[in-house]
Amino acid sequence: MIRPAKLVKAMKPYALADLPRSKFTLALNESRWPPSPKAESAGKLSICKASLYPDPNWQKLRAAIAKVHRLDPESILCGSGSMELIDCTVRAFADSGDVVLGSQYGYLFLGTVCQRAGARLKTVPEQDYTVSVDALLKAANAKTRIVFICNPGNPTGTRIDYEEIARLRDGLPRETLLVIDQAYAEYDGLDHSKVFALAERGDTVILRTFSKAYALAGIRVGWGVFPAAIVTEVRKLLNPNNVTSVSQAIAVAAMRDQKHMKSNVFQAATAREYISRHLLDCGFALPRSYANFVLVPFADAETAQLAESALKSGGLPPRNMAGYGLAHCLRITLGDVRAMARVKTILQKLVQKSNGKRR
Ligand SMILES: *Cc1c(COP(=O)(O)O)cnc(C)c1O
């Protein structure tokens, strides 16, 4: 009998959504709008170099990112998706048995990563579906190795502002690494240079991705800003040659085409305003979203299930939130305004029916 390692045997497999991967759905937070045509051409051209290994130092990609965000290229690491960076950062700084602190509705993948490291994930309650800096500061102590937050959050879509992040950082022990996952930051339309500057303190990491606003989830490229001493440790765990040459070429062209990305974000924001306004008018108490999806709370889990079935029948499957402890909610990725209008109509009918029953 071949025995797995104890740590692995004890792990639960990561729960992937059971959905077709060949077309856009409202369940995976992919971009409804296509990537830059320049990125597509760059990818096609790069295939003729497929016999060569990729640049293990992502030189062009780091230069392109550094130019747009006014960063030092040496502070940037690239990953096979930001998931690889989350994984390697946690494993580099949490020993077996160490505590990693997260937020109640934080990114589920963090739990998997902690299991891989043998670390213990503790979560603190959120307030109105929003990260609570007070709760994190109350729970953190000198033994807390890592505090991990998503801002804007997935699946909540809510955010905390720079002053709150700075208050969190200042209140945490200097020995605690703060990781800020900004997978959706492009969608909030704000300037994040002050957040990036936190990396200069030596104790804070900021993560980004090409999967969402750049519409490149399939090419698996993430990046982050890391303090120098942290770069050294995380690199030991990253796979050498982790980002394919085709993916690097595509990501470089996408980063250089800020105009395209911003126009996609604008269309997403228009759809977000549309669906948010109409659902609020129907009486749904949805938290304000700064991401490419909205979280819709229902009266209870049963109603959420009815809504899920209705949306599925309409060809608009949303994401079930039971795995996040939010069984009464559905997460709906932004599509074009026509798709959002259909979502609105389906949910409105449901509300009218249940109001009718109550009377
Ligand atoms: C989508 C998402 C990511 C991005 O992961 P990739 O590996 O870059 O595709 C990271 N964090 C959160 C919270 C996300 O929702």
Image (cartoon, rainbow, N blue to C red):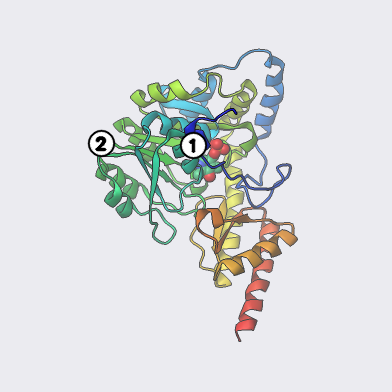
Label 1 amino acid? Answer: Arg
Q: Is residue 228 above or below residue 118?
A: above
Answer with mark 2 or mark 1, whichever residue precedes in sequence. Answer: 2
User: In the figure, residue 273 lies in which quadrant?
Assistant: bottom right
Image spot of residue 203 (x, y percent) = 31, 33
Image spot of residue 182 (x, y percent) = 46, 42
Residue ID at (63%, 64%): 305
Q: Quadrant of the N terminus?
A: top right
Q: Residue furthest top?
A: 52
Image spot of residue 120 (x, y percent) = 39, 42
- Ligand 1 neighbours mark 1 (CB distance < 8 Å): no
- Tell which of 353 and 188 is nearer to you: 353
Q: Residues within 10 Å of mark 1 (few under 14, many from 20)?
A: many
Q: Is residue 107 above or below residue 254?
A: below
Residue ID at (60%, 50%): 268
Q: Is residue 140 above or below residue 205?
A: below
User: In the figure, residue 206 lies in which quadrant?
Assistant: top left
Label 2 amino acid? Answer: Arg
- Tell which of 20 and 46 is nearer to you: 20
Q: Residue furthest front?
A: 1
Q: Quadrant of the C terminus?
A: bottom right
Q: Residues within 10 Å of mark 2 (few under 14, many from 20)?
A: some
* Image-based side of 354 in relation to 63, left or right: right
Total marks drawn?
A: 2
Residue linked to disc 1: 208
Cα gap from disc 2 to disc 1, whole angstroms: 23 Å
Residue 225 in view here: no
User: In the figure, residue 310 lies in which quadrant?
Assistant: bottom right
Image spot of residue 62 (x, y percent) = 49, 24
Residue linked to disc 2: 174
